[in-house]
Amino acid sequence: QVQLVESGGGLVQAGGSLRLACAASGRTFSNYAMGWFRQAPGKEREFVATISWSGGRTYYADSVKGRFTISRDNTKNTVSLQMNSLKPEDTAVYYCAAALSWNGSGWKREANYAYWGQGTQVTVSS
């Protein structure tokens, strides 16, 4: 089992920044690729970003590329999401997730992520 706890959400004006953090406990953190997903009201949950086990590879949704940065610290069992130039359409509940394997190029697939946090709300006002 891996327990994930997100923090750092809040209310910010458009153009502002937030940094989300996810603290992991349980099994060996470096055994897991880590991802961020989000779910806006009335919409399905969608992929945001992911980072490989050592941090050497990162992938982003087109909608956040160039604005968001995912990083991890395997010594502290944390993964972060730096969000800059926020837009109202970034408003959502953001979830941290852990995957033992992407099963090839499946880093966007929720089914590859076995463990999920409870989510943290991000609200961007216009």
Image: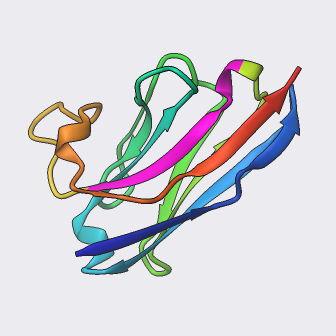
- The residue depicted at 35 percent of the width and 44 percent of the height is 57
Extent of the magenta region: 89-98
Whether residue 18 is situated above or below residue 89 in the rendered picture: below
Q: Quadrant of residue 80?
A: bottom right
The dominant secondary structure in magenta is: strand
Q: Quadrant of residue 28?
A: bottom left
Q: Quadrant of residue 24?
A: bottom left
Front-most of 57 and 88? Answer: 88
Residue 92 painted magenta: yes
Give the percent coordinates (x, y) of residue 16.
Answer: 86, 35
Q: Relative to 50, is 83 on the left or the right?
A: right
Give the percent coordinates (x, y) of residue 2.
Answer: 29, 73
Whether residue 75 is situated above or below residue 6 in the rendered picture: below
Indicate the quadrant containing the N terminus: top left, top right, bottom left or bottom right: bottom left
Farthest residue to the left: give it.
Answer: 103
Give the percent coordinates (x, y) of residue 21.
Answer: 60, 61
